[in-house]
Image: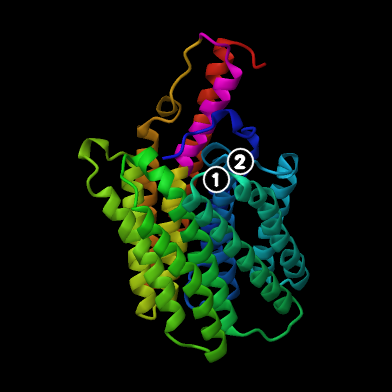
Amino acid sequence: MPKLRLEQAPAATLPLRFLLAMPCWGIAGGVLLLIDGAAPLHSRWHPATLALVHAWALGVLGNAMFGSLLQFLPVAVGAELRWRRSAPWLHATFNLGVLLLVAGLHAGAHRLLSAAGVLLPLAFLWLAAMTLPGLFVATGERLLRAGIAAALGYGVATALAGGALALLIAGRQPWPAAAVDAHAAFGVLGWMVLLLAAVGRVTMPMFQATASVPARAQATWLGVVALALPLAAAWHLAHGADGVLPWVVALGGATFALAAAWLQWPVPIARRNPLYRQWRLGLVALLLAAVALLAGRGPLAAALALGVGLPLLVGAMLLEIVPFIAWIGLRHQIRRGVQIPGVQRLLPDVHKRRVLLAQAAAAPLLVAAVCWPQPWLARLAGLAQVGAWAVHGHAAWGALRAAHGFARRVEKPV
């Protein structure tokens, strides 16, 4: 496990802008379900469906991954961030792009889609320009850096493809369904799962007391996924609907989920904290999503992956990262000789358990609403999503309030 470089941590506001936007977008996704009822659950091509999927994929997961990378790379990898002062503008560009895309898809507003088709690729290119130069010149942890670089490459490719599709829709031009499939595959497996697998090599041993996947095994998996995904996408685009691309996505995601669950298995019961349990639930959801995808149940697979599994994984990590950032801030702010509270005191496990219970209650309602799309059930699932993400956001803000309260009691901020 690499040595943490706390002195290189960015200003707390840099990653927190993105991380604290995550639960807000989770609430927005729940509100969309409350407004639209079962409409988004009948067809993948319904405007409300496209809006909801992108609220999850970009608003919830995208913000979490942007913020996590901007914190993780300097501290865990030693990669210097370029243009740190531009982070507020990156946050505004990205979230404005997400808002315009979700609103444009939902309302069929072509001007909004045109703007989103420019802003979102710009935001991903901006993130790559901030992170990749430092990642390439950093030393050590070659496998970690290779995994993150591959994920960033797929993130940019996903955004460029999505931007092109948004511009085609805005211009009322025909667009191939196979291109949407490739765009989704790049985003879920190439951007999200690759990044989770790369970062998990550090965070799982650090926060869950697991072992690490053997370097050769992870390098082989990374190489196979990184090469198979574009080849399968090219075949899919050339031959239309076929089973190759779904199999690559399902097997790549399932392999990650099984490996992570295998690493969790030996952890003693006494150390199975809320993070462990939330990850276990998220990994099970990812495995079920892979099965659903292979069974031809695309909407169910999307709900299990984008609405349950991946948000559980990244949301649980957010509840570790936010108090960690607050703790680093106290180290820099409080004079020497004063004992500062530990990370676990800033956000106790009791608050994380509440988040776990709220998410565990919301997940089956969402899955049930997809399987039996009734308006009342969809709205109940939406209400549960609003509640779960409100609990999540309250817990994250609670860690910051605890740190701020301690600093006020001890001394004025310097």
Which residue is under mark 2?
Answer: 15
Crowding around mark 1 (Cα neighbors within 10 Å: few <14, some 14 to 19, many 20+) is many
Name the residue at the top extreme. Answer: 337
- The residue positioned farthest toward the bottom in the image shown: 239
Which quarter of the rendered picture does the N terminus lie within? top left
Please say if the residues under marks 1 and 2 sit with CB atoms less than 8 Å apart. yes
The residue located at (44%, 28%) in the rendering is 343
Query: Which quadrant of the view contains residue 251?
Result: bottom left
- Residue at image position (31%, 45%) is 211
Left or right: where 101 falls relative to 381 = right
Q: Looking at the magenta stretch, what is its main secondary structure?
A: helix
Can you give x and y, in whole percent of width and height, for residue 185 in the image? 51, 71
Q: Which mark is residue 144?
A: none
Disc 2 crowd, CA 10 A, few/some/many (<14, 14-19, 20+): many
Measure the C-alpha gap from mark 1 to mark 2. 7 Å
Magenta highlight range: 318-337
* Residue type (three-letter) at the residue carrying disc 1: Ser
Element assignment for label 1: helix
Q: Is residue 284 magenta?
A: no
* Nearest the eye: 316 or 77: 77
Q: Is residue 328 magenta?
A: yes
